[in-house]
Image (cartoon, rainbow, N blue to C red):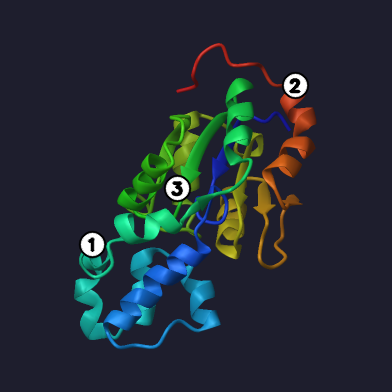
Amino acid sequence: MALRGVIFDCDGVMIDSTDANRQFYNLILEHYGLPHMRPDQERYCFMATSAQALESLLPRELHPLIPRMGREVVNYRHKIMPLVKIYPGFLDFVQVLHNHGIRMAVLTNRTEGGIKAVLDFFALPPYFNPVVSASGVRPKPDPEGAFRILETWKCPAHDVLYIGDSATDQKTAKAAGIPFVAFNPAQPLDAEMTVSSWAELRERLQPELATSQPASQDAP
């Protein structure tokens, strides 16, 4: 393939937020006197949007309050973001792609505010364009967000990689016709490539990187 672009999922790929998100949802459940999440609930909530997750965890009468819970019940930015960790090697990998003129985007089921909090908190470089969240398109596994990125780039799907860690990401990539890279998945996924670290992916992409053109200026 002629690698021209890479689309990143956020949670489980760019950042390790498993413990942080577990804390967030469990603190909300505690606030309303409800038990902590079961393992099956955790698996669903870590792939869903925050609204979908909370709707599945909370009784229907609390659903109208969900949009305010990340500020008023548990302040996500102040209490939870400090628990989030960026994956080792991610920034180095991103810099290598940038140096080779390869475009980058983010496709996440976080809200617009949620992904902005991640980008700002870790002061990530401004290489990701577009950043597509569940605030602007139908949530994954709907491929709307992936198609929007391809259209923005004017790039065919076979020249792009989608990197994710879940069955939701796998379905999104397949629906959009984009080759899928499974990053450190919790369970086996149907992927063109499965890797456990950014260093491993960088090594395995070396042939494609060697044939790409170094960037003379920031890609739009």
Residue 19 placement, left or right of 61? right
Q: Earlier in the sequence, mark 2 or mark 3?
A: 3
Label number found at residue 71: 1
Q: How many marks?
A: 3
Q: Residue at x 37, y 80 (%)?
A: 57
Of circles 1 and 2, the one toward us is: 1
Judge whether 54 appears above or below 165 on screen. Answer: below
Of circles 2 and 3, the one toward us is: 2
State the residue lying farthest toward the top.
Answer: 216
Q: Residue at x 38, y 73 (%)?
A: 25
Q: Residue at x 72, y 60 (%)?
A: 190
Residue 216 placement, left or right of 121? right
Label number found at residue 145: 3
Q: Residue 161: image x %, image y %?
A: 63, 41
Q: Circle 2: is it few (<14), some (14-19), or many (20+) Cα within 10 Å?
A: few
* Quadrant of the frame with the C terminus: top left
Q: Quadrant of residue 40?
A: bottom right
Q: Residue 131: image x %, image y %?
A: 41, 40
Judge whether 100 appears above or below 46 on screen. Answer: above
Q: Residue 15: image x %, image y %?
A: 52, 51
Q: Quadrant of residue 100?
A: top right
Q: Earlier in the sequence, mark 1 or mark 2?
A: 1
The answer to whether residue 47 of the structure is visible from this angle is: no
- Towards the viewer: 61 or 77: 77
As measured in the structure, the alpha-carbon distance from the residue carrying label 2 to the one carrying label 3 is: 28 Å
Q: Tag 2, which secondary structure?
A: helix
Q: Circle 1: is it few (<14), some (14-19), or many (20+) Cα within 10 Å?
A: few
Label number found at residue 211: 2
Residue 208 placement, left or right of 124? right
Amino acid carrying label 1: it is: Arg
Q: Residue at x 30, y 88 (%)?
A: 33
- Towards the viewer: 200 or 122: 122
